[in-house]
Structures are given as structure tokens and as C-alpha cells.
Image (tube, helix red, strand yellow):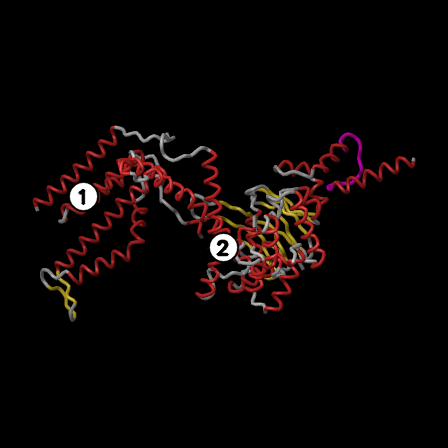
């Protein structure tokens, strides 16, 4: 049950999108978000959609996966649509009930917003689907490295992220084990009333925390034994190298962004 | 009637995904009341998955688990009662300890059974005695204890539910030889006192040979064999073929036989080997 949770949602593959430099991918994702939010008509949104689906096709990841990524945000989408419907009161009134007015302007805006958010989720999922969490962390570290000048602990932050990512599966497995052990002693975890369940949660959380602290302690010792002393002068196994294709991809993204800005002005 | 029985028990992990894997494959076996059974098998042979079916932590993909002749999944609501009747001690059970005192941790299981305070107290004291924890330890924090003591607290926590079948998954893993012998001794005494059925998973053939009436061997998700200790270790060659080992002393006596010195008996424990040799020597001296 817990085993089935996927974290990072990385979808291993060898497509052109997978092989792009993760730093470029992060930058392109940011440009993509800007692209979606500067365009305020359907033509701009259409251009954004072409970009999104083009990239999805290139990634060779089934479209189903992207639709699945939208699913958890469905309530949010519905609320956004509902609020826009009820409170945008421009244009002709289509339907009215007491103080609630639905206008064609409101309908228009809510449809627009929903499409925009769906595209946003699908596009940013592409980043996490095609980039392994570890490379993503590496890329973030490199992108943030200028902040080191103002004494921002970039390396430490990235290391913390990698360690956290690395230990999520371990801790899930551990939770699974502890849950089974307490269930074997008759603890009601997925059955029973809310209060007994809450009480029994303690029997899982205490051992879990103890083991997390123990692991942290052991990891710290192991790192020190291997002379870890922070980021200074540290070289890496996986060097991030940009290739011509990265610049091409970036250029394409910038072109799309420019197109959206121009089209936004024209219409 | 067998106390515990499986019929064509099969369990498949992650059905319908690329990670699909059958961990237990059509296993049928009968465990009689009062037996002491050693469970052997490689890592990944399916033995841990198998034992988690005995108390209903896992639900078979197909096949049945019968306790006292009744399918444990017949009534899903009653599955908790099965866990009180079949106690399962996991590997490294000390990591499941969470209470403030040893007493309260041992009492967790009995409390979940809904027993009254007097009965809980009786059980905690009795199991603490059984497993060799002195009474003054009961009011201490379990986190102050040594590794071996913690292990015994965790085992007592399951024993205190007085299950009719007690299953221990590698109860001696990671302990020093002294701690290992101590725990096995206590388990043996508990078995003698209660006459309950006990299953012990172990990688140590020496340990298994010293306590088990019967041995259950799993290999690649299938039941390789399940028979009396003598008969299982007599198949030493097959057992080493699936990558398991027989006790060293058995190997020594097998080699002796190959070289023409046959004692006519299978030997599994060093104590027995010593007696046998001494007797033989005495006989020769008489001659």
C-alpha cells in the first residue's frame, strides 16, 4: 500500500527531453510559466498548448501520465472555475439566481483560467517526469551558485535536498515495517475509531522518529569518515555539460515566448 | 487437526505493474499443534512473505490460510483476533518499541486485546520472567537498555498476548553469541512451559538443528521441503544445491562417512556428536 507511492515521479527514458541539461530545463520551465501568464488571449494560449504538447510528444511519455498529474489538483481547478464564474460580472448575463450572476465574460475567464492551469501543471510535470530528482538537485545547486557570494549556503541546501530525497523510500519502507509490527500486536491503524487510530499513530511515529534520528546520526558519521567537509573544493561524479541541443531548445523556447508577447500585443 | 494450514497459498506483489513478482507460489502445508519448527530459505525466497500470511498481515492473492481449520479471511472484521492467536515477531523487533517503560511496551498487545488490568499485569510479569527480564527493568525506559535486552522486551511484547502460535523472524540476528544463546534458551523454555507452536526463521543451521522438530525450507517462492529435522538434513546435497547449508558438524560426519567411517546416524549438533564419539570410543576400548 505504502509501497505504491511514487516520489519525484521520475519516468526513466532516453528521449531528447530526458537528455537535455537539467539547468536548461529549469530555466525553460520558468520561461514557460512566464509564457503562459503573459498571454491573455486564446491565441497566446494556443501557442502555449502547441509548445506543451510538442514537448510532451518529444518526451515519449504517455499522455495519460500527464492527465494523471492534473488529477490531484482537480478540486483546486473546480474552485478556481467556480470563483471566476460567480464573481466576474462582465458582459451579458446568462443566468441569475439571487445575487449570483453568471455572465459570458465570467464563463470565458473561467474556461481560460482552467486551460491555463492545466497547461501549467502538465508542462511543469514534464520537468519532474524527465529529470531524476538527483540531477534536478544538482542543477538547482548550479543555478543558485551565484548566491554563494552573499553567503547563502547553496551547497548545504542542495545536499539536504539530495539526502531527503534519498531517504524518502527508506523511510516509507521503515514505516511499512513498523506498521506491520504494531498491527501484529493488535494496533488498529486502518480500522477502528478516529481516537484509537490517532492514539495508535503514536506507536508508529515514535519508532519512526527514533529510527530517523539514528539514521541521521549514522549518516553523519559515515560522511565524516569519508572526509566530507562541505562544498568547498568538491568535485562531482556527474558533470553537467551543455550541448548544442540545449541552446537550440532554449532558443525555441525564447522564440515561443516572443511569439506569445507579440501576439498578446496584436490582438 | 492441524493448528495452522495453508492451501495453495499464493501471493503476488504489485499485481498489474512491471514490478509484479510472485513471492509465495502455491504453498500447501500443515503445522501441528505444539511443534517447534525451523524456517530456512535464502533472502528473497519468500519466507518472510509466507509468515506474514499466518497472522493475516498479508492477504493471499489466491489460496487459503486456515487456523484451527477455519479460513482466517472468512470474516474480514475478525482478522485482529487472528493476530492475537498467531503472534508474529518481526526481524529487529526492538525498532518497534515506543512506550516510556518496559512494562507499558510489553502491555501494549494485551491492552489492545481488551484485557483487564490484573490480567495484563500477570501476563507482563510472566513473560518478562519467561524471557529473562528482571522485574526492576520493568519500570525503566526501554531506550536505556542494551541491544539484547531491547530485543527481549520486543519479543515479550508479542509473547504477552499468549498466542497459540508464535512466529519469530530471525530473533537472533545481529546479536553476539552469548545474547543469541540466551534468547534461544528462553524461547525453548517458553516452549516447554506453554507447549505452544513455535516457528523460528533462522539463517543459522546450527541454531535450527539445536531446537527444531521439523524444518520448513523455502526456495524461489516455493515450498522446497517440510519435514522432520533428521530427514531434511539427510538431504544435505539438495539443500546445498539451493544455496543453503547444513550444520558444519553434519558436514564433518558426512565426510567421515564418505571416507568409510559410518556411524549410521545423522548428526546435527556438536553435543550429540561428542556423545556419539565418546560412546564409540568406549566401545572400542572394551573390545
The answer to whether residue B212 is left or right of residue A239 is right
Q: Residues within 10 Å of mark 2 (few under 14, many from 20)?
A: many
Residue A141 vs residue B164, the one in the foreground: A141
The quarter holding residue A186 reads bottom right
Q: Which residues are magenta?
A: B257-269
Q: Which comes before the other along the chain, label 2 or label 1?
A: 1
- Which residue is painted at 74% across and 40% down in the image? B270
Q: Position of residue A124 (x, y in %)?
A: 27, 44
The answer to whether residue A81 is left or right of residue B256 is left
Residue B181 vs residue A54, the one in the foreground: B181
Residue B108 included in the magenta stretch of the image: no
Q: On the image, numbered disc 1 is attached to which residue?
A: A35
- Which residue is painted at 80% across and 35% down in the image? B262
Q: Let me know if residue B6 appears in the view.
A: no
- Which residue is painted at 42% across and 49% down in the image? A4
Residue at the far left in the pictured view: A266
Above or below, B125 against A211 in this view is below
Residue at the far bottom in the pictured view: A98
Q: Marks 2 and 1, Cα distance to the nearest angstrom?
A: 46 Å
Residue at the far right in the pictured view: B287
The answer to whether residue A265 is left or right of residue A73 is left
Q: Position of residue B135 (x, y in %)?
A: 65, 59
Check disc 2 and report its element: helix, strand or loop.
helix
Q: Position of residue B195 (x, y in %)?
A: 70, 58
Discs 2 and 1 lie in a common subunit: yes
Residue B162 vs residue A96, the one in the foreground: B162
Q: Chain of mark 1?
A: A
User: Which mark identifies residue A179?
Assistant: 2
Amino acid at each position: 500500500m505504502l509501497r505504491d507511492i511514487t516520489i519525484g515521479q521520475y519516468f526513466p527514458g532516453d528521449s531528447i527531453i530526458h537528455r537535455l541539461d537539467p539547468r536548461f530545463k529549469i530555466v525553460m520551465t520558468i520561461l514557460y510559466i512566464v509564457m503562459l501568464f503573459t498571454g491573455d488571449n486564446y491565441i497566446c494560449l494556443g501557442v502555449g498548448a502547441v509548445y506543451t504538447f510538442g514537448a510532451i510528444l518529444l518526451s515519449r511519455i504517455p499522455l495519460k501520465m500527464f492527465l494523471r498529474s492534473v488529477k490531484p489538483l482537480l478540486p483546486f481547478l473546480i474552485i478556481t472555475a467556480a470563483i471566476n464564474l460567480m464573481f466576474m460580472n462582465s458582459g451579458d448575463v446568462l443566468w441569475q439566481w439571487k445575487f449570483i450572476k453568471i455572465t459570458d465574460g465570467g464563463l470565458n475567464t473561467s474556461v481560460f483560467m482552467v486551460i491555463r492551469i492545466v497547461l501549467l501543471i502538465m508542462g511543469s510535470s514534464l520537468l519532474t517526469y524527465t529529470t531524476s530528482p538527483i540531477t534536478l538537485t544538482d542543477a538547482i545547486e548550479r543555478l543558485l551558485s551565484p548566491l554563494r557570494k552573499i553567503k547563502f549556503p547553496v551547497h548545504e541546501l542542495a545536499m539536504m535536498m539530495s539526502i531527503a530525497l534519498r531517504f524518502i523510500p527508506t523511510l516509507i519502507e521503515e514505516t511499512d515495517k513498523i506498521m506491520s509490527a504494531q498491527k501484529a500486536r493488535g494496533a488498529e491503524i486502518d480500522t477502528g475509531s478516529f481516537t484509537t487510530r490517532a492514539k495508535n499513530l503514536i506507536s508508529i511515529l515514535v519508532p519512526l522518529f527514533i529510527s530517523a534520528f539514528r539514521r541521521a546520526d549514522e549518516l553523519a558519521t559515515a560522511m565524516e569518515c569519508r572526509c566530507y567537509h562541505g562544498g568547498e573544493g568538491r568535485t562531482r561524479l556527474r558533470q553537467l555539460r551543455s550541448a548544442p541541443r540545449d541552446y537550440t531548445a532554449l532558443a525555441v523556447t525564447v522564440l515561443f515566448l516572443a511569439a506569445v508577447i507579440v501576439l498578446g500585443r496584436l490582438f | 487437526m492441524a493448528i495452522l494450514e495453508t492451501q495453495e497459498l499464493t501471493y503476488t506483489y504489485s499485481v498489474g505493474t512491471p514490478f509484479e513478482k510472485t513471492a509465495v507460489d502455491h504453498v500447501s502445508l500443515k503445522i501441528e499443534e505444539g511443534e517447534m519448527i525451523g524456517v530456512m530459505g535464502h533472502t528473497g525466497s519468500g519466507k518472510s512473505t509466507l509468515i506474514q500470511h499466518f497472522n493475516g498481515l498479508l492477504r493471499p492473492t489466491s489460496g487459503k490460510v486456515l487456523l484451527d481449520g477455519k479460513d482466517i479471511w472468512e470474516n474480514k472484521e475478525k482478522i485482529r483476533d487472528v493476530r492475537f492467536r498467531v503472534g508474529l515477531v518481526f526481524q529487529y523487533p526492538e525498532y518497534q518499541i515506543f512506550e516510556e517503560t518496559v512494562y507499558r511496551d510489553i502491555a501494549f498487545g494485551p491492552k489492545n486485546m481488551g484485557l483487564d488490568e490484573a490480567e495484563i499485569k500477570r501476563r507482563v510479569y510472566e513473560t518478562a520472567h519467561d524471557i529473562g527480564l528482571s522485574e526492576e527493568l520493568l519500570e525503566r525506559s526501554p531506550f536505556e537498555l542494551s541491544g539484547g535486552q531491547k530485543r527481549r522486551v520486543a519479543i515479550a511484547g508479542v509473547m504477552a498476548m499468549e498466542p497459540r502460535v508464535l512466529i519469530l523472524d530471525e530473533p537472533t540476528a545481529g546479536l553476539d553469541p552469548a545474547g543469541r544463546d540466551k534468547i534461544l534458551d528462553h524461547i525453548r523454555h517458553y516452549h516447554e512451559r506453554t507447549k505452544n507452536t513455535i516457528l523460528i526463521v533462522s539463517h543459522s543451521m546450527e541454531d535450527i538443528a539445536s531446537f527444531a522438530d521439523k524444518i520448513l525450507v523455502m526456495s524461489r517462492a516455493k515450498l522446497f521441503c517440510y519435514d522432520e529435522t533428521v530427514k531434511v538434513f539427510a538431504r544435505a546435497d539438495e539443500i546445498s544445491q539451493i544455496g543453503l547449508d547444513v550444520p558444519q558438524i553434519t558436514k564433518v560426519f558426512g565426510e567421515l562417512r564418505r571416507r568409510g567411517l559410518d556411524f549410521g546416524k545423522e548428526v546435527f549438533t556438536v553435543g550429540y556428536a561428542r556423545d556419539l564419539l565418546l560412546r564409540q570410543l568406549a566401545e572400542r576400548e572394551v573390545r
